[in-house]
């Protein structure tokens, strides 16, 4: 499930891309598809890094890549080991809501980004996320824990205050919002509910097949029902 719109980043051969908080490597893998880039996936979880490695190796076996290079690192987003101004693009997708010291995390992603280059940030959208928190007291503790809910103006203001300028915004994954509401109703950690499992099968099918009909519905509903807020900045 790709949240970031890579076409908005203006990626060119030779660019260095950092996917911080890469998780299982979905955005790292998509970045590796870009022509002639070097992509680094970084996460604090060793298990996630291992899964990301397997994903990237699969891209290589299937020859689904742009002929560039990749690397993985165990990294704390609040204290990254990379040099300042060392990446042409930074992706930070569904990460900041998990970080206790999110101010330090924001300062770090700006530090490692080259001046004039883009940063893509996504977080759960405020109102669908608020409903999840209301429906289930256990939701925020699931999925490695959500510490906060961002309003768009607050997220933008915080990132602008550390040296960024917004240039684009959109919402994503409207079809996923009802799924999370259903999970919260029955219990976010339960895996035996037939309605939730049926919806999950539908989402898995949609991700794999990408039929035009559901892609159109998703795009039409995203401005209202999109689960993720995605904001694009440029380092001043």
Image (spheres, grey):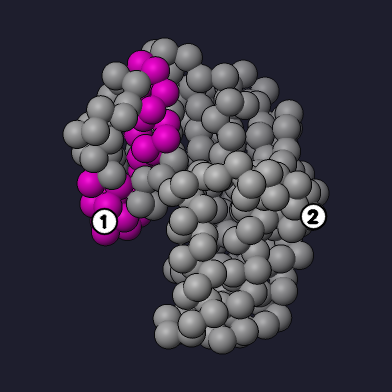
Residue at the outermost top position: 13
> Percent position (x, y) of residue 76?
39, 50
Position of residue 211 measured from the top left corner of the image (x, y, whole percent): 55, 45
Residue 121 in percent (x, y) is at 60, 42
Picture residue at 52% right of the left edge, 45% below the top? 210
Q: Mark 2 to mark 1: distance in Å?
A: 36 Å
Badge number at residue 46: 1
**Residue beneath the point at 47% across and 75% down:** 197
Left or right of 202, for residue 68: left
Disc 2 is placed on an element classified as helix
Give the magenta part as a residue range. Answer: 28-54
Evaluate whether residue 201 shows in this view: yes
- Quick one: 144 or 104, which is closer to the camera? 144
Place of residue 163 in the rendered image (x, y in percent of width and height, measured from the top left): 67, 32
Q: Is residue 89 above or below residue 28?
A: above
Q: Is residue 203 above or below residue 26?
A: below
Binning the other alpha carbons within 10 Å of mark 1 as few (below 14), some (14 to 19) or many (20 upward) gives some
Q: Nearer the viewer, residue 188 or 174?
A: 174
- Residue 74 seen anywhere in this rendered image of the structure: no
Q: Quick check: is 4 in the magenta stretch?
A: no
Q: Which residue is mark 2?
A: 224
User: Which part of the image, by quadrant, shows the C terminus?
Assistant: top right
Residue 2 is left or right of residue 214, and the answer is left
């Amino acid at each position: 499930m790709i949240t970031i719109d890579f076409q908005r980043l203006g990626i060119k051969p030779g660019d260095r891309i950092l996917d911080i908080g890469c998780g299982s490597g979905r955005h790292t893998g998509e970045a590796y598809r870009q022509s002639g880039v070097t992509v680094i996936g970084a996460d604090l979880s060793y298990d996630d890094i291992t899964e990301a490695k397997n994903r990237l190796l699969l891209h290589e076996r299937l020859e689904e890549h742009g002929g560039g290079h990749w690397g993985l690192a165990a990294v704390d987003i609040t204290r990254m080991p990379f040099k300042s101004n060392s990446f042409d693009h930074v992706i930070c997708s569904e990460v900041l809501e998990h970080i206790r010291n999110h101010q330090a995390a924001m300062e770090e992603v700006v530090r490692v980004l080259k001046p004039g280059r883009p940063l893509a940030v996504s977080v759960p959208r405020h109102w669908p996320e608020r409903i999840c928190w209301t429906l289930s007291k256990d939701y925020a503790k699931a999925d490695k824990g959500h510490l906060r809910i961002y309003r768009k103006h607050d997220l933008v203001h915080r990132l602008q205050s550390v040296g960024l300028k917004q240039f684009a915004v959109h919402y994503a994954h409207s079809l996923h919002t009802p799924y999370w509401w259903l999970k919260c109703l029955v219990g976010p950690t339960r895996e035996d509910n037939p309605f939730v499992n049926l919806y999950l099968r539908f989402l898995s099918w949609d991700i794999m097949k990408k039929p035009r009909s559901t892609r159109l519905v998703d795009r039409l509903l995203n401005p209202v029902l999109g689960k993720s807020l995605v904001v694009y900045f440029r380092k001043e």
